[in-house]
């Protein structure tokens, strides 16, 4: 990877107009590609956006741009799967795991109380573990974790070694969580999908790893969320700029995750 020139490729798709016009979010995706791989990366993102359980898009934007920054490769977080019998159990388990990661109980409660509001946000919400308040000031846009990729061959090898299924959603979510937890201001992440046919979610933290929870909502429910619990006394502009701009590969043979 070293010495190569890379491009960040991004896709977003919506229905009933663009996101800015109030359209419904359908799908988004991220790749880091060499120049020679751009056609495949664009096609893969096009396919992703066109065949989505949230519906048929009538707006899609795919763009690529040169990445003028060296790209590090970091090791994915440790992964574990926790079974939940109901969405209620799943949320209780998520609360326990967030506490284990260092988020105070009252702050978790405050975040869960606003979860319907947060599910309307397109990107992630930054939630301060000190004040129990949302601190990203990005309104309905939120923060989009960008410029990351996990090369498929490496993911397949990693998954085969662990007997983990080749699940592209898990791959993408684990890549996001690994990048997110790599910033020192981030204490933990809570996420579940906005796709009606996908009910598994997760809590992730630096020491906790990537803890999948098999049921966070009911099938058919189109509300998801992505909340980053952060230390509000840290430099949050640095954190947001890292999440959006710092290019990163996930790689089984990469550096440990805490290398920001
Ligand atoms: C998403 O689809 O946007 C998030 C999926 C989160 C869970 C992925 C998994 O580990 O199965
Ligand atoms: Mg989705």
Image (tube, rainbow, N blue to C red):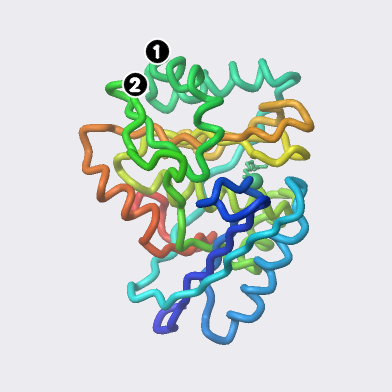
The disc placed on residue 24 is: none
- Which residue is drawn at the image coordinates 76% and 49% (left, top)? 55
Disc number lying in front (1 or 2): 2
Q: Which residue is mark 1?
A: 106
> Looking at the image, which is closer to me, 25 or 211?
25
> Looking at the image, which is closer to me, 58 or 100?
58
- Which residue is drawn at the image coordinates 53% and 53% (left, top)? 175
The location of residue 63, given as percent across then percent down, is 52, 71
In the image, residue 73 above or below residue 36: above
In the image, residue 35 above or below residue 242: below
For numbered disc 2, what is the local secondary structure? loop
Which picture quadrant has residue 13? Answer: bottom right
Whichever of callouts 1 and 2 sits on the residue coming sooner in the sequence is 1
- Which residue is drawn at the image coordinates 47% and 76% (left, top)? 7
The location of residue 188, given as percent across then percent down, is 43, 34
Q: Point out the residue furthest to the bottom here.
A: 36
Q: Which residue is mark 2?
A: 132
Do the residues under discs 1 and 2 have CB atoms within 8 angstroms? yes
Ligand 1 occupies quarter: top right
Q: CA distance from mark 1 to mark 2?
A: 8 Å
Badge 1 crowding class, 10 Å Cα cut-off, few under 14, some 14 to 19, many 20 or more, is few
The location of residue 201, given as percent across then percent down, is 63, 35
């Amino acid at each position: 990877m070293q010495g190569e020139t890379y491009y960040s490729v991004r896709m977003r798709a919506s229905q009933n107009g663009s996101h800015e016009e109030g359209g419904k979010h359908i799908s988004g995706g991220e790749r880091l590609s060499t120049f020679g791989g751009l056609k495949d990366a664009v096609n893969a993102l096009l396919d992703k956006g066109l065949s989505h359980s949230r519906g048929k898009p009538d707006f899609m934007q795919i763009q690529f741009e040169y990445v003028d920054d060296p790209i590090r490769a970091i090791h994915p977080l440790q992964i574990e799967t926790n079974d939940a019998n109901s969405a209620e159990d799943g949320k209780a388990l998520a609360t326990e795991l967030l506490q284990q990661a260092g988020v105070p109980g009252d702050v978790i409660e405050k975040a869960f109380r606003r979860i319907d509001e947060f599910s309307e946000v397109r990107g992630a919400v930054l939630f301060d573990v000190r004040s129990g308040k949302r601190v990203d000031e990005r309104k309905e846009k939120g923060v989009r974790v960008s410029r990351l990729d996990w090369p498929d061959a490496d993911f397949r090898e990693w998954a085969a070694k662990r007997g983990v299924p080749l699940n592209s959603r898990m791959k993408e979510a684990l890549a996001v969580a690994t990048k997110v937890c790599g910033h020192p201001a981030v204490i933990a992440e809570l996420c579940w999908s906005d796709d009606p046919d996908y009910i598994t979610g997760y809590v992730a933290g630096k020491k906790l790893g990537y803890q999948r929870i098999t049921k966070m909502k009911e099938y058919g429910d189109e509300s998801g969320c992505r909340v980053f619990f952060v230390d509000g006394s840290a430099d949050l502009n640095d954190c947001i700029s890292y999440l959006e701009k710092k290019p990163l590969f996930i790689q089984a043979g990469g550096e440990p995750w805490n290398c920001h």
